[in-house]
Image: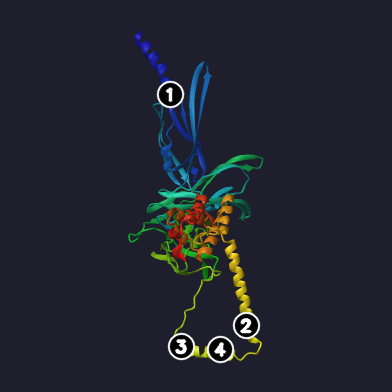
Amino acid sequence: MVSRIVVLICLVLLPLQAVAALSASVDRNPVLAGEFFNLTIRAEQNVKGEQPDTTALLKHFVVGPTSVRSNTSIINGQVNHTTQWQVELMARNPGDYTIPSFTVANMQSSPITVKVVAASNADSKSKDVYIETSMENNELYVQQAGVYTVKLFLANDLTEGQLGSPELENANVSQLGKQKESYEIIDGIRYLVIERNYLIQPQKSGQYTVKSPYFKGRIRDNYRTRAASAIGRDIQLTIKPIPNNISGNWLPSELVTLNEEWQPEKQSYQIGEPITRTITITALGITKEQLPEINLPSITGVRSYSDQADTNNLVRNGKVISQKVESFALMPQTPGDFTLPEVRVPWFNVITNRVEYATLPARALTVVGDPNFIQPTTTPIQTNSSPADELTIKQTAKAFEQPIYYWPLVILGYVLWLVTLFIWWLKRETNSPVNTNQDHLLTVNPLSGLQAALKENNQRSFYHQLIKLCKSHTGSADLTKLSKALNNTDFDNAVSHLQANLYAGKNHAVDLNDIYQQIKSLNKKPKGENELSQLY
C-alpha cells in the first residue's frame, strides 16, 4: 500500500518537473545580416525579480531592448503560469553563431545555432532601407581626427525610427553638427537620404574596427506600416603611435597655418592709442580643443591684454577643419621702436611624417608721442664769429638803408610795447591772490573733467580726461610718468585694469574715486615735496 502511494506521488510530480522548464527559440533561421530577428526565452512558471543575462550576445549581435510578459491560464481546473522575454537581435556579419544558454530561477535553456546569410549588394540596393558608411582616411595617428560619414537611404515614408551611432574601442566618437537631409534617385527609385558626420579621435595605437550604426524603425507600406531595419559596412582602421622623437605639444595634422590682422594698420602709433592684433590658427585633421593657445611675450613699454578665444569646427570634403581666433589689445606706454618677436607653432605633418612650424614673422612697432605737443626749445648764444656771422652783419648793415620814415615807426612801436607791458603788470598785481602756490601741478580744468566723469561713473570719459591731464602737464600721454610720481602700485594696477576694460573687453572692478583722490593729492604737496618736479 505504501509503495503505491509513493508511485502515485512520483507520477504527480513528474509533469510538474516538466512544466518548470526554460526554453529559447528564434522566429526564423537562417537570417539575413543586417536584419533584426526575435529571440524568445520562455519559463513555464511565474518568475519575479529575475531576467536572462543577455550581455554575452553583444559579442556577435546588435542587441535591442528586452520586453517581458507574464501570463496565467486555467485549463480543466489546472492553473498554468508562464513568463516570456523577447529580445531583438541583429547580426552584423554572415556566419554561424551560437546563442548561449540562459539561466533563470535555477532553470537553464539549451543553446541555439543561428545561420546568418549575407545580403548581396544588388539585394541591398533594391531594399526600401539601407545604410552606407565611409571614411576619407583609414590610417590615423593617435589623437588625429577622422571624419566618419553614415548615410541612411529610405525609399518609403518613415513613421518612426532610430539611427544609432558608430562604435570604436579606445576612441572618442562624437557627432559633428546636425544631420542633413536630401533626396537622390538611384536605379529609378527616389530615396530620402539622411546624412550624419562623426568625429573619430583614436587614443591608442593598433588595429581597430569601426562598427556601423544600425537603423530600426517602421515605414509606411501602402495602407499599413511594417518593421524595417538596416546596418552598414564595418570599416577597419590602422592607428599609428606617436613618434618617439616628439616632445612637447603633439599636434598631428595635414596643414597648420597662422594669419594675423592689425586694426588700425599703419606705420606708427601714438602713446595710449589702442591697437587690436588678431591671430588666427587654422588646422586640418584635429579638433578645436587641440589647437594651442597663442602666448605673446611681454614687452616693456607696450601693455598687452588677451581676449576670449573663439573656436569652431567644420567639415569639408570628408575632413575636419578647426580654427581658433585670438585677439590681443596692445596699449603703447612709451615712445620708441619696438620689435614684436616671431610667433611659432610646431606641428607634426602626417603626410611627410616630420615636424614643421607655422610662423608669423617678427614685426616692428613704432610709437611716437603726441604730435600736438611742442617741446620748448632754447637757442644757444654763440660767442665765436663765423662766416654766418659775417653774413648777418652784412644783412644788418644793409637794413640801415631804409626810407626816412622807418625809424619814427620803430620808436613808436617800441613805446607802445612798453605801455602794454606796464598795463599787464598792473593787472597782474591787482588780480593775484595773496596766497598763491605757483608750484601746483594740476589746474582746475583737468580736475573738474575728472570729477565730472567720476560722478557719471563713465570709465571711458574718465580715462580720456586722465590722458588729457597727463599731456597738459608732462607733454606726453605716457601715464607711467604719473605712476612714477605717485610711487603707488595701486594707481598703476588701477590704470592697467581700466585700459583692459576699455580696449580688451575685460570686466575688472576699477575704483575711479581712488584714482581721482591720488591725482588730487599731488596738489596738496608743498613745493619742496612735489614729486613731479623731475618731469619738467
Q: Secondary structure at mark 3?
A: loop
Which badge, 1 or 2, is on the more N-terminal residue? 1
Query: Which marked residue is nearer to the observer: mark 1 or mark 2?
Result: 2
Which residue is painted at 40% across and 52% down in the image?
203
Which badge, 1 or 4, is on the more N-terminal residue? 1
Instruction: Give the image quarter of residue 449.
Output: bottom right
Q: CA distance from mark 2 to mark 3?
A: 28 Å
Residue bearing mark 1: 20
Instruction: Using a 10 Å C-alpha cutoff, classify the residue at mark 3 as few (fewer than 14 neighbours), some (14 to 19) or many (20 or more).
Output: few
Q: Secondary structure at mark 4?
A: helix
Q: Given contact means CB atoms under 8 Å apart, are the residues at marks 2 and 3 in contact?
A: no
Instruction: Using a 10 Å C-alpha cutoff, classify the residue at mark 1 as few (fewer than 14 neighbours), some (14 to 19) or many (20 or more).
Output: some
Give residue 386's position: percent from left, percent from top: 46, 89
Query: Which marked residue is nearer to the observer: mark 3 or mark 1?
Result: 3
Q: Given contact means CB atoms under 8 Å apart, are the residues at marks 1 and 2 in contact?
A: no
Q: Secondary structure at mark 2?
A: helix
Residue bearing mark 2: 410
Which badge, 3 or 4, is on the more N-terminal residue? 3
Give residue 276's position: percent from left, percent from top: 52, 62
Q: In the image as oriented, which residue stretches furthest toward the left?
A: 244
User: What's the mark number on residue 385?
Assistant: 3
Looking at this view, is 536 or 14 the one in front?
536
Instruction: Using a 10 Å C-alpha cutoff, classify the residue at mark 4 as few (fewer than 14 neighbours), some (14 to 19) or many (20 or more).
Output: few
Q: Secondary structure at mark 1?
A: loop
